[in-house]
Image: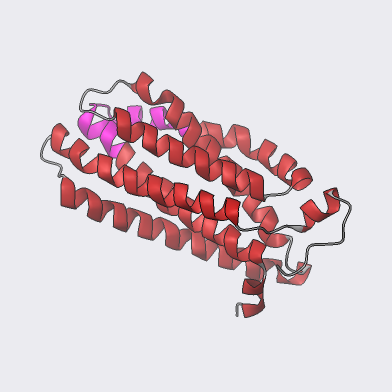
Amino acid sequence: MLPMSFFGHRAFVFTNIASLAMYFGMFGAVFFLSQYLQLVLGNSALQAGLKLLLWTGSVMVVSPLAGVFSAKYGSRPFIVAGLALQAAALGWIALVATPTTSYASVLVPFVFGGSGMALVFAPSASAILSVVRADQAGQASGAANAIREIGGVFGVAVLATVFAGAGSYATGHSFVTGLVPALWVGFAVLAGTAVVIAAVPWRTRQTAGVTGGAPAPAN
């Protein structure tokens, strides 16, 4: 069972909110971006997968660095930066997406999106585990994983609803007409969550250790 005392820790609550928003915005968007590369820009499934490797490759490069530096400086600034980068990525793609957009036009936002995900992945895990006892790590990790999956499910569902309401799969133009507002919804969720995480003060034990204070309190 999940101890409700976990939700007395601001770090646990707001880190999970950040993870929920990340999976909502990014996985909902990637669901459509893979189709955009194939159905609108004319790539095969293999070509689309290879082009999306720029996104996933950025995650693999940045994640280890994010984990190291978040352990030293605290998770919160990295989570805020990651959400902001992801929001910028979706907003950028929404601005340049057309039926004839070149792959070069989305190279930078793809890197932003992957880097932003990496800045949330490792620091969020550290933040969640820092506020529970060692024997509670499994419960805390399980709760975080469940919340992330819920975010992904709702992201695909909500963005698909927005897409269906504004566009369709009939033509490349109608696909883009639905894609753009869906991306803006993802942008709004990510940007809004970044503002909330930046505005609400909370610390992890790593941060307290760096500043020379005692371990972080429940809040």
Q: How is the image coloured?
A: secondary structure
Hey, which residue is sitting farthest left in the picture? 170
Quarter of the image for residue 167 reads: top left
The C terminus: image quadrant: bottom right
Task: Where is residue 176? Give x, y as percent.
Answer: 21, 36
Q: What secondary structure do most residues of the magenta stretch adopt?
A: helix
Whether residue 68 is visible to the viewer of this picture, yes or no, is yes
Residue depicted at 66% across the width and 58% down the height = 201
Task: Where is residue 147? Give x, y as percent.
Answer: 50, 64
Residue depicted at 70% across the width and 61% down the height = 129
Residue depicted at 61% across the width and 32% down the height = 61
Foreground residue among 27 and 76? 76
Q: Which residues are magenta?
A: 34-55
Give the side of residue 163 with respect to residue 184, left or right. left
- When the figure is inspected, residue 19 is found, relative to residue 9, above or below; the finding is above
Q: Give the total of numbered labels.
A: 0
- When the figure is inspected, residue 54 is found, relative to residue 66, above or below; the finding is above
The N terminus: image quadrant: bottom right
Hey, which residue is sitting farthest front in the picture? 199
Give the side of residue 156 with respect to residue 211, left or right. left
Whether residue 53 is visible to the viewer of this picture, yes or no, is no
Task: Where is residue 177? Give x, y as percent.
Answer: 18, 39
Magenta-drawn stretch contains 41:
yes
- When the figure is inspected, residue 101 is found, relative to residue 204, above or below; the finding is above
Magenta-drawn stretch contains 178:
no
Residue depicted at 54% across the width and 32% down the height = 58
Give the side of residue 57 with respect to residue 65, left or right. left
Task: Where is residue 156? Give x, y as percent.
Answer: 33, 54
